């Protein structure tokens, strides 16, 4: 790799006119200056296109084909040695691109460098957003190192390797990052690093977050069967055990109407769930306060309830749908 490689920053966008100015302003402040910007607007219905045209970049307008197709299209037009995928609701730290190049130079075995979200949101918002921002930060920072999942809301890939593995699977738009990361990890090391950071605008409402997490959980089932081995990253064995306690707690809770002893069993399951990721709650306690920590525990349990039943739904779909079972057979 050249000592000063051209980076192609590829931004897929769909209706993020609100966050795009912050995204571009952060790019304008980068300490690393040898980069181009390619924005693929995926059929936005808001003011996105008019916002994009105010900033120096190559704009590609398409129909609404999904984030995977948008990223692939941007990569096909990239002139850089590195393609850096950046979501339009992100604002990079000033040294993010410089640190990406540095990571590639320091370890030739690395073919993909993925960054992390800051523990502060791009825009202030509800407690739901505060919960999601801190939870995203902690899970990533506690998984720093080589991983098998990709995080392409801010992640760079050597262009030659990206094209070699076939890019994003255009059939996927809820689990495309994980699936591409898995294929990349079979070809090279995928590095998750806190040296590459950015501010992210997370969900502000629980309903929106729950819907997204439920859909992602469904897609995990055929992926797990396709991979046939545990992932390396934030999906740890202890967190898997915690998910089992979440499922058990949802089964026990309705029984408390019949017998209050079941209520104690419910709280025991919730406590066990908390203990499986105790470091996360200690982190939140230090960052915030006891009241917010209690809220965080409740919100995290509720999100995991949604995820658990998404996994159950995914497993049932896997049993009865051949098309779903073959979802991750990329290229077939």
Image (cartoon, rainbow, N blue to C red):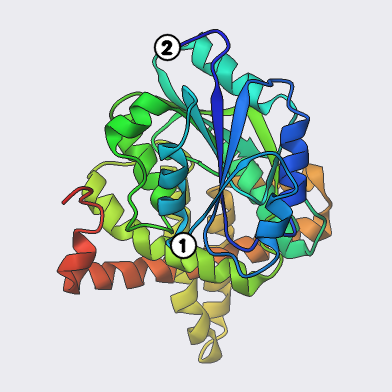
Residue shown at the point (39%, 38%) measured from the top left:
181
Camera-nearest residue between 221 and 93: 93
| Among the 4 quarters of the image, the one containing residue 217 | bottom left
- Against 20, is 103 above or below? above
Q: What element carries label 1?
A: helix
Residue at 35%, 46% (x, y): give it: 179
- The vertical placement of 290 against 192, above or below, is below
> How many other residues sit within 10 Å of disc 1, few (<14), some (14-19) or many (≥20)?
many
Q: What element carries label 2?
A: loop
Where residue 134 sits: x, y (%)?
70, 48
Please give the residue where the numbered disc 2 appears in the rendered image.
Answer: 108
Mark 2 neighbour class, 10 Å CA radius: few under 14, some 14 to 19, many 20 or more: few
The x, y position of residue 60, in whole percent, is: 53, 50
Q: Earlier in the sequence, mark 2 or mark 1?
A: 2
Closer-to-camera residue (198/87) = 87
Residue 244 location, quadrant: bottom left
- Image coordinates for residue 49, horizontal then vertical, percent: 66, 58
Q: How far apart are marks 2 and 1 (CA)?
A: 42 Å
Residue pictured at 47% horizontal, 43% vertical: 74
- Horizontally, residue 137 falls left or right of residue 106, namely right
The residue lying at 42 percent from left, 11 percent from top is 108
Q: Can residue 308 be seen?
A: yes
Answer with left or right where residue 97 lies relative to residue 24: left
Tag 2 and tag 1, C-beta contact below 8 Å: no
Q: On residue 39, which mark appears? A: none
Quadrant of the rendered image containing residue 291: bottom right
Q: Can residue 305 be seen in this view?
A: no
Residue 245 got which mark? Answer: 1
């Amino acid at each position: 790799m050249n000592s000063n490689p051209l980076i192609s920053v590829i931004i897929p966008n769909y209706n993020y006119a609100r966050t795009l100015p912050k995204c571009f302003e952060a790019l304008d402040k980068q300490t690393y200056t040898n980069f181009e910007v390619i924005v693929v607007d995926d059929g936005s219905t808001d003011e996105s296109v008019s916002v994009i045209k105010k900033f120096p970049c190559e704009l590609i307008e398409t129909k609404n084909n999904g984030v995977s197709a948008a990223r692939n299209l941007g990569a096909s037009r990239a002139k850089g040695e590195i393609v850096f995928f950046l979501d339009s609701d992100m604002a990079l730290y000033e040294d993010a691109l410089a640190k990406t190049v540095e990571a590639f130079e320091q370890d030739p075995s690395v073919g993909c460098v993925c960054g992390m979200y800051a523990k502060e949101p791009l825009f202030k918002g509800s407690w739901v957003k505060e919960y999601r921002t801190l939870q995203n930060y902690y899970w990533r920072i506690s998984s720093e190192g080589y991983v098998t999942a990709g995080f392409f809301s801010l992640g760079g890939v050597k262009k030659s390797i990206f094209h070699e593995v076939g890019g994003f699977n255009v059939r996927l738009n809820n689990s495309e990052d994980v699936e591409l990361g898995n294929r990349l990890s079979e070809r090279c090391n995928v590095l998750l690093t806190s040296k590459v950071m950015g501010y992210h605008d997370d969900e502000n409402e629980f309903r929106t977050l729950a819907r997204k997490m439920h859909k992602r959980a469904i897609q995990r089932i055929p992926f797990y069967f396709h991979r046939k081995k545990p992932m390396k990253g934030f999906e740890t064995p202890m967190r898997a055990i915690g998910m089992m306690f979440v499922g058990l707690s949802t089964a026990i809770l309705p029984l408390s109407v019949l017998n209050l002893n079941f209520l104690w069993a419910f709280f025991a399951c919730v406590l066990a769930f908390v203990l499986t990721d105790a470091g996360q709650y200690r982190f939140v306690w230090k960052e915030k306060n006891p009241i917010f920590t209690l809220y965080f525990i409740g919100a995290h349990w509720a999100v995991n309830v949604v995820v658990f039943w998404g996994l159950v739904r995914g497993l049932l779909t896997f049993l009865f749908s051949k098309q779903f079972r073959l979802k991750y057979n990329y290229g077939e």
